[in-house]
Amino acid sequence: MGTQAVVIGEALTDIIERPGQMDEEHPGGSPMNVAIGLGRLGHPVLLGTWIGRDPRGQEIAAHCAASQVKLLPGSDQAERTSTALAQVDADGHAEYTFDLLWQVPSIPARLGPLVAHVGSMSAVLEPGADEIAALLSRASANATICYDPNVRPDIMRAPESVRARIERLIGLADVVKVSTEDIAWLYPQRSEAESCADWLGRGPAVLILTRGGDGATGWTAGASVDVPAGSSRVADTVGAGDSFMSGFIHALWGADLLGAQRREALKQIPKPTLHELLSTAAKIAEITCSRPGADPPWLSELSQLASSDR
């Protein structure tokens, strides 16, 4: 069985606009941010993405390397590197406009990861959506499957255009994280509680709903747990959900709850353990929100915080 994480999805350049400030450019993209978070937390991770060999693509490759993330060979064959315009308001909330060029790079059949994560636009848009679903189906023989819909209305256009594909991925996943904004956009005619109950019934062992400043809730078939958001000053929310996702995977890794052979244990997580896992993810997201851009913490930072809390 594999000992690494594999993340498949978009990496792009975030162009960040803030009121009264010069524009900034940073490497971004939800799947890449999850990979970066895992790499900084000390886990071996391979990212399959689609970037160019232009200056922006080279910066993304360097950013990944600096955070201990390896790129799947062939991930740099795009004609150009995609971008996301992030317009950040005075409260730190970001709205995105995307220019996305996407293709699934060639994935070797020999890969048998401990955990596989997909999310956002690349998981449900063609070309590639069917291929990603097939990859996850194969990977589930060895790996825990994690999914974050991370919907982007600007490029997904309408809920009806992606809802069936999102629901298909939920059915393949062991862990699903979704935000209140995602749920509201996908199912405007029904309550949040109805949507979450429906998703949990589709098969995930764990469903997590993040509520921004109101914290998060996690469900298994037998338990539900609420955790508060952090109290640190928010610089912006760029990458916050991705940090929560990588933080939860990190916590599962430490609790020996990853891999296909641990699937039944994952379904039966005791309530205190679920609370601890979610609290770890929330702390990691809090650190990311406390500084500009998608800048998740390193394992050494968590160790320092843990020491100072004793």
Image (cartoon, helix red, strand yellow):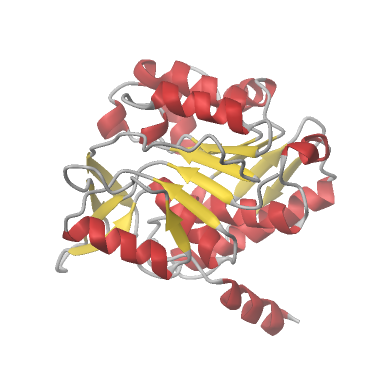
Q: Quadrant of the N terminus?
A: top right
Taking the image as shown, residue 33 lies to the left or right of residue 205, namely left
Number of marks in picture: 0
Between 22 and 171, which is closer to the camera in this rendering?
Answer: 171
Residue at 14% x, 68% y is: 22
The vertical placement of 157 against 104, above or below, is above
Residue 267, image quadrant? top right
Q: List x then y, in percent, for residue 115.
A: 62, 44
Between 81 and 84, which is closer to the camera in this rendering?
Answer: 81
Q: Quadrant of the C terminus?
A: bottom right
The vertical placement of 187 against 36, above or below, is above
The answer to whether any part of residue 307 appears in the image is yes
Q: List x then y, in percent, for residue 131.
A: 43, 25
Between 295 and 36, which is closer to the camera in this rendering?
Answer: 36
Q: List x then y, in percent, for residue 86.
A: 25, 52
Residue at 40% x, 25% y is: 129
The vertical placement of 237 against 218, above or below, is below
Between 284 and 173, which is closer to the camera in this rendering?
Answer: 173
Residue 99, image quadrant? top left
Residue at 66% x, 39% y is: 143
Taking the image as shown, residue 298 lies to the left or right of residue 293, namely right
Taking the image as shown, residue 74 lies to the left or right of residue 287, namely left
Residue at 52% x, 19% y is: 190
The answer to whether any part of residue 188 appears in the image is no
